[in-house]
Structure formats: C-alpha cells, structure tokens
Image: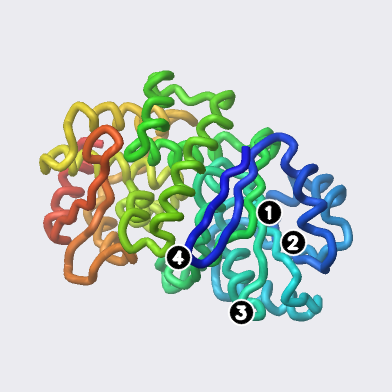
Amino acid sequence: MVIDVKTSSATGKIDIGEDVIARRLPYLLQGQKNFVLTDTNVYALHRPFFEKWMQGEELFVLPAGEEHKNFQSLQAILERMAAAGLKRTSRLFAVGGGVVGDIGGLCAALYMRGIDCVQIPTTLLAMVDSSVGGKTAIDVAGVKNIVGAFHQPIEVLIDPMFLGTLPEREWKCGIGEVVKYAAMDRHTFDALAAVDGNITKDLAVGLIENSVRYKAGVVERDEKETGERKCLNVGHTTGHAIELTYGLSHGESVLWGMKIETLLAIEAGVCNPAHGARLLQFVDKALALDGGEKPDFSNLGAAAGKASLDKKNTGDGNVVMSVAKDYGEWTLFTLPLPQYVQALTELAKKL
Ligand code: GLY
C-alpha cells in the first residue's frame, strides 16, 4: 500500500508491505553516497539486513536509548556526515525506532541546510507515528523534543518483518500510540472495538495502515501543528511528565497519560462518559499487555508540575491537553496548573 503525503513544504510517500525493502531500497540508495543511521539494538538484531542492503554506505551506530537523543549525538553524527564527504544529493536513511528517526531526521534537516531523509521504522511505535509527518528533534535541558525542525521524509518504508524481533515491551509501547488514534479516528476505534481491545500481532498491519492513513491526512492539513495536528498529542501532556518522572517508555507513558487525561475530561464533562469508558477499556487492556506492572504513583502530584514544561502549553499557567470528546471527536482541554496538580494528586490514589 502506498500513501502519498503532500504538505505545503514537501511531497513524500509512505510504502507499507512485506516487499517494500526489496522493491524500494535499492532504487533509493542508487546514484550517490548515502548515510545510514541506526542504533546498537537494531544493528545487533538486524545485522544481515545492513550487510545485504546497505553495504558500502556510511554507517553510524548510535548507542540505544532516549538519553542519547541529545546534542552530543547530534554533533557526532553531523561531524561524521561531513567527514564522509556526503553531498547535497546524498540521503540519510534512519533505520530504527523513535530515537533514531527523530535525531536522524534532524541531522538530515541540518546537513547542508537539508538533504533527503528516508525513514525505515523498526518498531511499532515508529511505524504508526514517529516516522510519519516530518517531526524531528532532540531533548535538551530535560525537555523532550524541545530542539528540532519539521523535515518531511521523502519516503517512509514500513516493512512488518521488523516486528518479528520486537521485544514485548516495545510492542506495548507501539500499542500505546495505536490506542491514541482510537481517541479521534473512527476506523481505529472500530478496529479495537471489534476485538474488544484485545490487540494481537496478527492485527498489526491493519492497525498500522489505519494509523498512518489517518496521520498522513492530518499532517497534510496542518503540517506545523497550528491546529488539527494537536489531536496527535492525546495522552502526551501528562504522558511526557510521567516519562520524565518515572522513566517509563514513551508508549507506556502515553497510555498512562491517556488514562489520566480521559478520567479528567470525563470528570469535567468534556468527554462523553460512555465513550470515555470504552477508551479506558482499550487503555487498560494495553497497559495489562506485559503483566501490567503499575508504577508507584504516590508522588504523581509532584510529577504533574512537569506537564507545564510541555511545549503544547501556552505559558500562561495552564496545562493544555488533547482529549477525546466523543466517537471520532477530540478537543483541547485546559486546566490551570494548580487545579491539574490537585486533580492528579487525587487520582494517584485511584489508579
Ligand atoms: N507524534 C505527534 C505528531 O507527529 O504530531
């Protein structure tokens, strides 16, 4: 399946399928010296892939982990790109999960003021969300994705064969982002409702296609997140505060964020309670996927303060959340920071 993405700044495409690497990669690599960015986990799991398809390209293997999405890594990658003599026609191939895609995309945006980037996501999370839409970034001063650029990939190659080696926890992280789409996309909601929230691996390709198609439409209409694209941040305001405080993965944090924000929105009369209850059921099933261990949320009120660091906030002392309103409908929901902190302190006892 091929989905075209046309924004005001660029035209790209997303190619999904088992044959996508063989069909597209040799063509995209040919004719110039290219740069391949991956991380130690992906390289260890898929070394034959790199040897078969990317022999002779400049390979940079980043240490795995969100803590490496920083200035030091950015500098090291850019210096290597320059030392390798990459030209303006060279392409950067980011092969990995969200960290590799985000920092790789940013290097492509910066090198010679912008070279082509091809995203090859290897995790479910990167396939359904981060590889699509051109957001690139690093974390600075303890704030996630605070330094970055919009730089649309010329192509995203989504090959489900990479999911075969995905650890259970990574699968759960990706499911977090899939459940997020159910808050605004009717197709994803219906797909999850049809299986009562019991998401199994055989559903992966259908869920990826739904998510990517939905996201591509949003990105085409609002590339720079001035309005509609904010819907893709469901669960993320509180999720980012949880991620920073408890060291959970991004997807798990988004699931907890979605649970908390949906409960707050129901309580405030912003979300239809019956619809919210269905979403909470999907969230709970996803949270239970790897045994469902719950973090000690006793200091959730203190963690809540970090939500004010989120870049979606307007700086006027309010916390802004994107929440489900009803079937296929979402809205922005704003609470003053003290009220938000108080609400999370109360909720912590009930989660
Ligand atoms: N991950 C949210 C977005 O791409 O806008």
In what element is the residue under mark 4?
strand
Give the vertical position of 340 relative to 278 (above or below): below
- Which residue corresponds to mark 1? 95
- Which residue corresponds to mark 2? 36
Left or right? Give the position of 53 relative to 341: right
- Which residue corresponds to mark 4? 145
Crowding near the residue tagged with mark 4, few <14, some 14–19, many ≥20 C-alpha atoms within 10 Å: some
Label 3–label 2 contact, CB within 8 A = no
- Choose mark 3 or mark 2, whichever is in front: 3
Image point (48%, 40%), residue name:
211
Crowding near the residue tagged with mark 2, few <14, some 14–19, many ≥20 C-alpha atoms within 10 Å: some
> Measured from the top left, where is residue 89 in percent x and y?
75, 72
Q: Amino acid at mark 3?
A: Arg
Q: CA distance from mark 3 to mark 1?
A: 21 Å
Q: Amino acid at mark 2?
A: Val
The circle drawn on residue 113 is 3
Report which quarter residue 261 is drawn in: top left
